[in-house]
Image (spheres, rainbow, N blue to C red):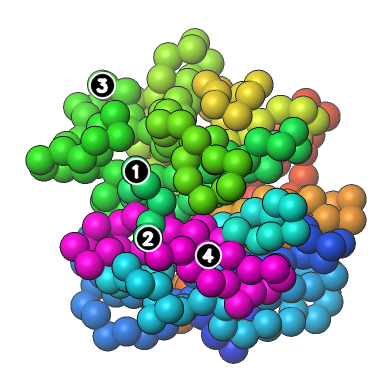
Amino acid sequence: MKRYLVPNDYMADPAVHVFNNRLYIYPSHDWESGVPENDNGDPVNMKDYHVYSTDDPMQGDIVDHGISLTVEDIPWAGRQLWDCDIAKKNGVYYLYFPLKDKNDTFRIGVATSSKPEGPFVPQPDPMRGSYSIDPAILDDGDGNYYMYFGGLWGGQLQRYRDNKSLEAATFPADDEPAIPARVARLSNDMLQFAEDPRPVVVIDETGKPLTAGDNERRFFEASWMHKYQGKYYFSYSTGDTHRLCYAIGDNPYGPFTYQGVILTPVVGWTTHHAIVEYKGKWYLFHHDSVPSGGLTWLRSLKVCELEYDADGKIRTIEGTE
Ligand code: FUB
């Protein structure tokens, strides 16, 4: 069984966490901005975030806590508030969000609140050395927090190598290693990277990094990290092949060995997700474009249960069910 969570609005890119025994959902807020469709994602032109919460994602009430942050509140803002994520440390909630700056370059910003639903107050500048999109935070439970990030095409990751911007976007040849997501431990104050971001390498069963031409399996965008039975599950979208896939590692930095497909393609170009355990059950939150009739930039939030087999493999879920 799947459920649309916010039937009266367009919400996408869920990040989901348990705070104070309640499930909090942090989606992107799609709207009809009127910008024509293109490969850069320009019509995906979000300008604010809402926060939702529930104590039962499949059947319970979904509480809309209203607007938690708007683009006008962010001093360095250009446009496009894309997929965000959140972490809690010492009673403070840190919301991490990608946004194009005034030069139309994606950077990652931080905003803080004393409550999980916000409102969030943004820092005056983006995180130093940040680039691209789709921050996802792992609270490793030992005092360390890690940010996974990056996304191709409109997400601009192809403009960077070794954390430096290139003069021109560059894609590897099909037989070269794929462009990886990035991971960096966060500073003690949660406002900066504590180290240079490192590549998140996904390897095949023989130990070789997935190649750029391996379009059905290689990383494109939408990083998520969760832990299951002591292992680190890195999951992501394959972008133009429209799958949610995952890979397993022994530590936050990887490498991660490719395992398989979590969700087959949904209606709509993008696919994006969060995996979370709540009250003893595992859930996949994601989006599709069924309610808007397939429009890429008007997506709707969904949830279903997720299952592992006895070996810790995730059972594949059909995107069109
Ligand atoms: O919502 C804008 C972008 O679309 C996200 O940042 C990507 O992951 C994709 O879902």
Q: Nearer the viewer, mark 3 or mark 2?
A: 2
> Which residue: 19% across, 27% down?
173
> Which residue: 89% across, 56% down?
279
Picture layout, residue 119 above or below residue 85: below
Q: Residues within 10 Å of mark 2 (few under 14, many from 20)?
A: some
**Label 3 – label 4 distance at C-alpha:** 40 Å
Q: Does the magenta segment cover residue 56?
A: no
Which label sits on residue 125?
2
> Which residue: 48% across, 68% down?
122
- Label 4 sits on residue: 111
Range of residues picked out in magenta: 95-124
Relative image position of residue 10 (x, y in whole percent): 51, 80
User: Dot 4: what SS?
Assistant: strand
| Labels 4 & 1 near each other (Cβ < 8 A) | no
| Labels 2 & 4 near each other (Cβ < 8 A) | no
Q: Nearer the viewer, mark 1 or mark 3?
A: 1
Picture layout, residue 207 above or below residue 67: above
User: Dot 2: what SS?
Assistant: loop
| Labels 2 & 1 near each other (Cβ < 8 A) | no
